[in-house]
Image: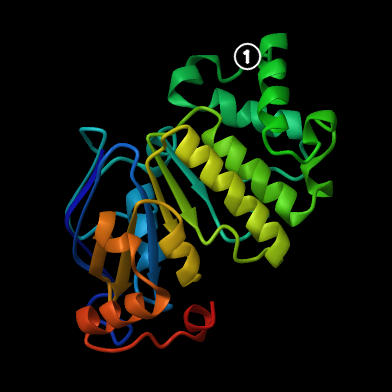
Amino acid sequence: MLELKQVSKTFNPGTVNEKTALEGVDLRLEPGDFVTIVGSNGAGKSTLFNAVAGDFLIDAGSITLDGADITYQPAYRRSRRIGRLFQDPMRGTAPHMTIEENLALAYLRTAKHQSSFFSRVSKADKALFREQLARLGMGLEDRMRQPVGLLSGGQRQALTLLMATMVPPKLLLLDEHTAALDPGTAEKVLRLTREIVEGDRLTCLMITHNMKNALELGNRTLMMDGGRIVLDIGGTERAGLTVEDLLERFRAGAGKGLDNDRILLS
């Protein structure tokens, strides 16, 4: 489904600000894999997502999605097959447009519907939007004409999740998508995430700073440090791990302990 081979990226090469963000990353995801990623700030987690999404060209290696080489494909083309959520609930939606209009943009921009990008939304489409909004359990199906800018952060993030998955993407990238939410709202969005990803059998990568969530969600956990994947664990080996076990495995793989309080206190 997704395969990265020896992916490397260095920013500002040959200067005093040179930074190796990714170093020889190898990663393979099978269809339906739900993989959580943890690591200290600067470990390369978001840079890995940016590389997959096409925000920049990598220096070396290759990226393949669903059998197609996307290494040099522009971001706008990748976005038709890759759904993405960010930490900031304000990203991913148009605040001055209504809920219905935002859903229509997300629906019509997919590869399957790109020939109809400027088409009007049909009654059947609106019925689908209402049905999908009802899945969120937030009453948004009765507020489809309301501007998105009037929604709470949690409601906007749930809506963005729906927009990214309404037409199932080949790959879903979740970049700390609950970090800016209050604990109660974050828990609700995580529950929706699990229901949608597992229910629709989506292939998903999720960055989190919460070690407990990293072990409870999905079927596999990666730990990154210094632009490298230092731990890749899944199956029965992962099932019995505690947070303390995971920290110890990281220490063995990276040669040092995690130095990020946000992770250690989660």
Label 1: element kind: loop
Q: Residue at the location (66% across, 16% down)?
A: 125
Q: Is residue 149 left or right of residue 266?
A: right
Q: Residue at the location (27% across, 84% down)?
A: 251
- Give the image location of residue 260, x and y in percent: 45, 84
Residue for badge 1: 119
Q: Is residue 230 left or right of residue 165?
A: left
Here the colouring is rainbow
- Give the image location of residue 264, x and y in percent: 48, 83
Q: Is residue 171 above or below residue 43?
A: above
Q: Residue at the location (55% across, 15% down)?
A: 116
Q: Is residue 8 left or right of residue 212?
A: left
- Give the image location of residue 145, x and y in percent: 84, 30
Q: Residue at the location (72% across, 18% down)?
A: 126
The crowding category of the residue bearing disc 1, from other C-alpha atoms within 10 Å (few below 14, some 14 to 19, many at least 20), is few
Within the image, what quadrant is residue 30 found in? top left
What is the three-letter code of the residue carrying label 1? Answer: Ser
